[in-house]
Image (cartoon, helix red, strand yellow):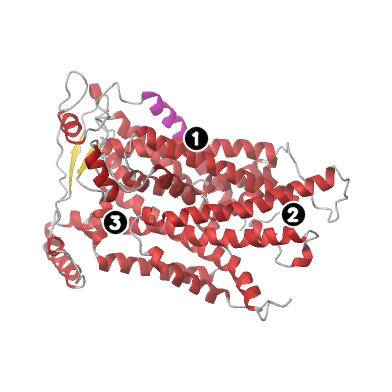
Amino acid sequence: MKNYHSITIQVDDDGSTNLDHHLQAKEGNPHPQDHLVPPFFSSQQDEEQATKSDRPSSLLVGTFNLIATILGGGVLTLPIAFQKCGVAVTTIFMFVSAFMTYMSLMMLCYCSRRSGGSSYGEVVRSAFGERAEVGVNLILFVYISFVVAAFMVLIRDIWTPLVGMFLGKTEDDEGHGGVSGDQVLLGFMIFLLPFLFQRSLHALKWNCYIGFASIIILCSALVRGGFQRQHNLHLADEPDDDGVYNIEWFKVPTVQDSLFAFPIIMLAFLCQFNVLSIQNTLQRPTRKRMSEIVGMSVGASMILMYLFGLGGYMMYGSSIQGNVLLNISVDKSAYADESLYWLFLLGRVGCGTTLVLALPLSFLPGRDALLEIIDVWFHHSHHRSNSAETEHICWNALHKFNKNETPLDAAITTEQEIEEIETQPLNDEHDSSAPKPTILIRDRPIQQDYVFRNSVLHYGSTLLIVTYCFIGATRVAGVATIWSLVGSSLAFFIAFILPFASFIVIEKGVTDGNDRLDGWISIARVMLAVSIVGAVICTWNRLSTPV
């Protein structure tokens, strides 16, 4: 069971603790303040065993997992950010968002190492308590549900005309005669069920490789088309036929346009909910290797997204729409260069493939957030005297409907999976009223708790989320409706506010003064203030602007 009593950790003269010495001797961890779950494994023999089971992911797999999480549906809206703010200002926004994302991801990884938390929710729990863990998982679950529904809308909108072309059923001018978009979406969701039933990101590594290669095709088409149009206009003196093509390189945007564009760019980098799962499965998860994964992922994604947004803007100019695919025609007669038509057709197929394969990467953390809420309730329920009977009924129900349990799981009534202890800050720097970080001692990550292993909860929650997201996707006209419902405030909260706030609390509780990142604490404070101001201003702007 979870132990909620506080234990003061004694600090030695060198700043280390008895817990640090125990973990360092047990795991061979080069950083005694890091409490990794699963354990680090320093010996070659143990490392090989971990590679086969607890830590199967290589540096390459971890990098592509994070890249594939970033390169989701948000990339399709980047060209309009260039149109709103011009190339120069948007470039600055891209670098700022990439830097803040890198710092946020690294601080989340440090928080996990300091606290022993194996999930986003457990990191927040270590900083702010159990109620905060439940609250942030509820927010994550709601947010990711909107994201999954948005993916479904995009899949429907991209693949419906392509399926119609393949079957020879194209719509007429009045919108009749084509294939049903809802039926196309239903077919893709049935195809995706085996991927959605997976339990880890490592199992989806091929989705990441294929999805990354697919999005490059559409990016190449936009870049080629954009530069070709620029060449025709400026070198061949070709006149602007439609009168709306205009590229502004050094535009001074209005405040309204800036507040419209920056959340779009920031949202495109959102991947914080997956980074700890990647760290949990990485072979030899040193700080340096995690820094390499985060740096390469954010850097490669920024380059690809920048080229994607710039290429789309140069291709369509001021006529660009919120979803760049709405500008890309599937009619061959719309292209003077037939090779460009085929490239864009392949690009549309590639983008659709990317979204189909990226959907499970966003779906898994949403399901994990829901199961973590249930997991916390099961662990906490035995501390309430009036819930013993309810707990007994729930455990019996789970065992009854889960016929394939192992003998160990079948005997579980109240788990003994985690111990929680309270740290003693260095030199008692914490104010008595300030939050005190805790360290979670686990033998395995939360994703291997009984609630996560239970087949009834696993498959039941998967089908439940798929069903209501599918119903929601079929009831809205387009993806813009979903993004307007989500709002920029949730994205700021998940991507920046919570990671920076958690880092400040947890890092201040580090007992080794030589290992504590005081400079990063100062950076986190500045970024937290900027994030809060940005969330308030962007949310106010969104609420005051008609949909």
- Residue 77, how many percent across, how many down? 61, 52
What's the residue type where badge 3 is placed? Answer: Ile
**Magenta region, residue range:** 518-532
Separation (CA) of disc 2 from disc 3: 45 Å
Element type where label 3 sits in the image: helix
As drawn, is 112 to the left or to the right of 495?
left
Magenta stretch: residue 158 in it? no
Residues under numbered marks 1 and 2 in contact, where contact means CB atoms less than 8 Å apart: no
Q: Counting residues from the N terminus, which is met first, the one under dot 1 or under dot 3? A: 3
- Quadrant in the rendering for residue 97: top right
Q: Counting residues from the N terminus, which is met first, the one under dot 1 or under dot 2? A: 2
- Considering the whole magenta stretch, tell me its main secondary structure: helix
Q: Which residue is mark 1?
A: 530
- Residue 8, how many percent across, how many down? 15, 32
Indicate which label's residue lies in the foreground, 1 or 3. Answer: 3
As drawn, is 488 to the left or to the right of 426?
right
Magenta stretch: residue 521 in it? yes
- Residue 177, how many percent across, how many down? 66, 81
Q: Which residue is mark 3?
A: 373
Quarter placement of the C terminus: bottom right
Residue reaching furthest to the bottom: 177
